[in-house]
Amino acid sequence: MRVLSFFLFFAVLLLSCKPGASTETTAAMSPADEVKALEAEVMSIHDSLMTRMTDMTRLASELRLIKSKMTENEAGKIESPAGLEEAMASLKLAEQGMWDWMKSYTDTKPTIPEDQLKSFYIKQLETINKIRQDMLASIDKAQSWLADNGIK
């Protein structure tokens, strides 16, 4: 039931995201157009990352399944293969970073005065780019671990 709720929430969230608009340069734009272009760039990155969230969920599920099938050693302890815990933690941290950013963005955006929107979006662009790095790195780490361990 919990997994079903997560996927339902995720599907609604994906459908509510609006695609980014233009990719114009900000050189000859009015301040309002610069803000719109920055917002479009932030949302474009966000939207592309939302499609990767399913990859992260799938990979995390595969890694949890592998961990759940592990048996105890002679000492009665379950020892994960090298790198498994790190790959799982990386996916979890990257996913949480995205959820935290989305919450912060939706809570903060309405409170920003119009004359501070450009600065706000510049900071959001830096943050979402860092989140993109973290997400892509965690996906790569999980895929590499699976490949290195003969899973894929």
Image (cartoon, rainbow, N blue to C red):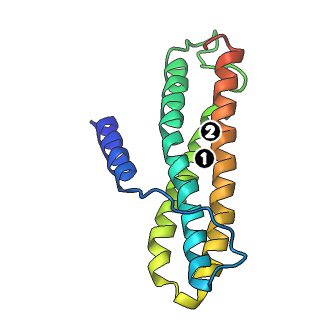
Which residue is labeled 2 in the image? 89
The residue lying furthest to the front in this view is 28
Which residue is labeled 1 in the image? 93
Q: Is residue 108 above or below residue 66?
A: below
Is 108 situated left or right of 2 in this image? right
Q: Position of residue 113 (x, y in %)?
A: 52, 89
Is 25 situated left or right of 39 in this image? right
Q: Is residue 147 above or below residue 93?
A: above
Q: Is residue 60 above or below residue 129?
A: above
State if disc 1 and disc 2 touch (CB < 8 Å): yes
Name the kind of residue labelled 2 in the image.
Ala
The quarter in which the C terminus is drawn is top right
Q: Residue at x 55, y 69 (%)?
A: 39
Q: Residue at x 73, y 76 (%)?
A: 27
Nearer to us in this view, 141 or 41: 41
Report how many numbered discs are placed on residues in the image: 2
Crowd around label 2: few <14 · some 14–19 · many ≥20 (10 Å): some
Name the kind of residue labelled 1 in the image.
Leu
Q: Position of residue 9 (x, y in %)?
A: 33, 48
Nearer to us in this view, 91 or 49: 49
The quarter in which the N terminus is drawn is top left
